[in-house]
Amino acid sequence: MSLSAEIFIDKAYIDGRWRDAERRFSVSNPATGETLASVPDLTADDARDAVAAAEAAWPAWRRQTAKQRAALLRAWFDAIMAHQESLARLMTLEQGKPLAESRGEVAYGASFVEFYAEEAKRMAGETLPSHGADKRILVFREPIGVVAAITPWNFPLAMITRKCAPALAAGCPVVIKPAEATPLTALALARLAEEVGFPAGVLNVVTASRPAEIGEVLTTDPRVRKVSFTGSTRVGKKLLAQCAGTVKKASMELGGNAPFIVFDDADLDAAVEGAVASKYRNSGQTCVCTNRLLVQSGVYDAFIEKLAARVAQLKVGNGLDDGVVQGPLINPAAVDKVQSHIADALEKGGRLVCGGEPHALGGTFFQPTVIADVTEAMHVAREETFGPLAPVFRFDSDEQAIAMANATEFGLAAYFYARDYRRIWHVMEGLEYGMVAVNEGILSTELAPFGGVKESGLGREGSHHGLDEFTELKYVCVGGL
Ligand SMILES: NC(=O)C1=CN([C@@H]2O[C@H](COP(=O)(O)OP(=O)(O)OC[C@H]3O[C@@H](n4cnc5c(N)ncnc54)[C@H](O)[C@@H]3O)[C@@H](O)[C@H]2O)C=CC1
Ligand SMILES: O=C(O)[C@H](O)CS(=O)(=O)O
């Protein structure tokens, strides 16, 4: 079967069957506003059907050997990569990111499937020194059970595979609720999973325009034992509270407020490249995007000049067009947030260096923007912009930079550029973040534990740590020996 970006899958996927519904909702292309397709607008009852299907599929799925689960995951990886171009085009159509970024996301998302196909065979238990000659201690690692995955629109494929691959590898069935803005990529993934032979009920996709109704089921149904969420901290807190009633294990990948610190001994050209990569990836719509640039006084003007020259080269347009590196924002509300942050900063003394306005293309296209002389009195100091705005703060001492960087309730990703090794160790250890990049602007890989501290979330995704999120330990004490 070949997946074509022009042939959209327009049914949800529950218990190995494609499900339609009378009520449907439309999916549009953020670059043009055109309607791409419509998908079923499922209800709480449909969500309960998906949970029931997952629970029914679980015993057989967990009885499969690790090698059998690994083989299916590997086949899914191969299918995803075989359809990289179709999936990338589909993603650009429904989310807006440039085609090159979409291709990159397909490979990034597939890398989690490949990695956990391998990790499945390493889900080991252990024996421990016992507390008596007549006793033995056994520790088993077991699949936690039915997993609910609620995923965002900004990485329509990778955020699904980053959750489902370890869950499936561990022996757990999954119910996916993708973002209402980007369900088509999720359904294409389900089609490929069906194609390679995942058993009915092991992977389910519930499409809905009213997420709260579906979320209520997924966070309160006792048959669901794990909720894995990526999205806003606001929604994450709500879901976490809803999980409390049945004491569900929860992973939360939430919002960020990433500092990007440039010290006076940094390689400024490398720092500019890193800042552009970190700030403007997906038009600034990632949770690990730089949200604040902190630049030491001695290099402040030089850095601003270099950054502005580089930002001016960024081509804005439809992600399907050659050379475009900045697509549209996901919706008008995203544009409003960027504009409110710009207006507030300029009103409070910020200096517009470049951009600052909606793009001449109209719609939700926005000019990549740099504002200098930004201070902690401005909203951008505390709020995640989630758009192509680079606010540049100034600092003098290393201690001041660390304090400014940590002055937030978030703690997901932080970046800094420096060359003195004592400074690097001092700053790396002083930053209160789940992830720190030193002289790098992009840190995401399936090989490392991705996640935040404070109000940026709970748990880790990727690396062998990512498998732990979907397993429980069972301690067995064997006595009378
Ligand atoms: N940490 C991360 O990776 C991400 C963070 N964000 C943050 O979220 C903000 C808004 O982006 P959105 O995609 O709108 O995030 P969101 O948090 O509103 O939505 C994320 C997912 O949660 C679902 N959802 C929303 N309300 C829900 C509810 N009451 N019950 C169950 N599910 C619910 C949505 O349908 C979507 O699937 C961004 O401005 C950014 O701050 C967004 C995407 C990724
Ligand atoms: O949700 C996001 O923004 C992603 O987690 C960022 S990344 O992992 O693709 O870098």
Image (cartoon, rainbow, N blue to C red):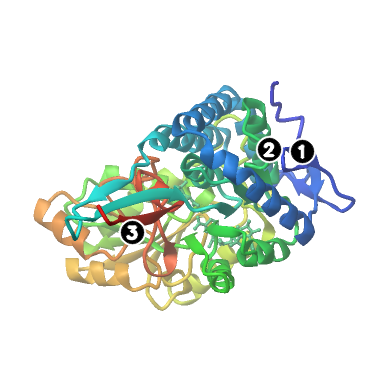
Q: Residue furthest left?
A: 422
Query: Which residue bears the numbered disc 2?
Result: 200
The quarter holding residue 413 reads bottom left
Instruction: Out of 61 and 383, give the one closest to the viewer.
Output: 61
Residue 166 pos. (x, y %):
47, 43
Marks 2 & 1, CB-CB < 8 Å contact = yes
First in sequence: mark 2 vs mark 1: 1
Q: Secondary structure at mark 2?
A: loop
129 displayed left or right of 64: left
Marks 2 & 3, CB-CB < 8 Å contact = no
Query: Which residue bears the numbered disc 3?
Result: 434
Instruction: Out of 456 and 275, give the one closest to the viewer.
Output: 456
Query: Which residue bears the numbered disc 1?
Result: 17
Q: Residue furthest right?
A: 22
Between label 2 and label 1, give the one nearer the viewer. 2
The residue positioned 28% from the left and 42% from the top of the image is 270
Q: Secondary structure at mark 3?
A: loop
Q: Is mark 1 within 8 Å of ligand 1?
A: no
